[in-house]
Image: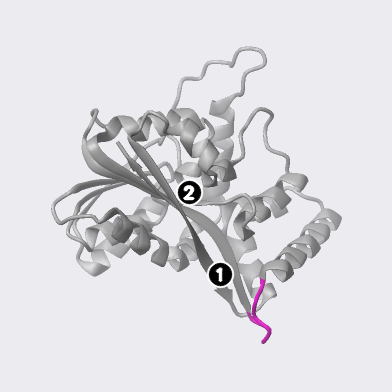
Amino acid sequence: METATVLEKTAPAAGRTDFVALKQRQQGAWASGNYAVVGTTLQIVGESLCETLDLRAGQTVLDVAAGNGNATLAAARRWCRVTSTDYVPALLERGRARAEAEGLDVTFQPADAEALPFDDESFDAVVSTFGVMFTPDQDQAAREMLRVCRRGGKIGMANWTPDGFVGQLFKLLGTYVPPLPGVKSPALWGTKARLDELFGAARGITATPRSFAFRYRSPEHWLDVFRSWYGPVHKAFASLPEDRQSELERDIFALIGRFNRADDGTVVAPSDYLEIVVQK
């Protein structure tokens, strides 16, 4: 979950996607709730990614679209020198509070994933868990990650897949609140074909299927948390009239039912993602 700095206020050419407008819309969506409430539950993904990257103490690590800092904290716990970035300052403050509570030394800096304010080849590793995948200009974000990663370094990501629970949630939301024309689905970052397009200049790309289980007290509890705190769901409901909100609620419960493997009234809904290592 990622964020934006100020960009040029130039109008897009005819037929071209207005990435500035989309970025502002996305930033408003992610800032409207409190992603940290949901993000904290995903901590295990950041830990797994850092182990897969085989991070070493003293390495420089950049967390792009860091949200409230899951990968940031995981890397800092391994004694790396971590810079945590996002375009929603409030989320960086959540990450800062978590780092301070653990006594971890982390640099927090607002930054746009499509225009990272760092020199070429500045970091040994560049990471992002469920963050950079939401950038409007996917190709530019990938170029920036490659640019700031040193030669011989690694880029590590965790990206939701199109057919998994979260991928299907975003597909469902898109039927109620259509995305701007010309914008590619974030879930494409969870496909090997798209990763090859984005990072084809790298020496190697490894994509390993993983699964994260959302665990909640009940389907109603899941919806209450996501409707209250998860920006895209919060904004979708807020933009709809009451009758359409009821329809979206019904469809979300049906989606949860498709994925929920619990039989005791709780929710245990596995969501597939790709754990990706790009060797530069």
Residue 117, compared with residue 98, is above or below; it is: above
Q: In the image, 110: left or right of 238?
A: left
Q: Amino acid at mark 2?
A: Met
Judge by depth and name the residue closer to the eye, 95 or 277. 277
Work out whether residue 62 or residue 149 is closer to the camera in this orientation and state it.
149
Establish if 4 lies above or below 257.
above
Q: Residue at x 44, y 28 (%)?
A: 140
Q: Residues within 10 Å of mark 1 (few under 14, many from 20)?
A: some
Find the magenta span and give its range: 260-266
What label does residue 214 carry, if any? Answer: 1
Residue 240 picture location, percent across and down: 77, 50
Place of residue 50 in the rendered image (x, y in percent of width and height, measured from the top left): 31, 57
- Residue at 26 percent of width and 32 percent of height: 118
Q: Residue 123's quadrant in the figure?
A: top left
Q: Secondary structure at mark 1?
A: strand
Q: Look at 67% across and 32% down and name the residue there.
A: 180
Q: Tell me the element at label 2.
A: loop
Q: In this figure, which residue is indicated by the disc labeled 2? A: 1
State the residue in front, 183 or 6.
Answer: 183
> Disc 1 vs disc 2: Cβ atoms closer than 8 Å?
no
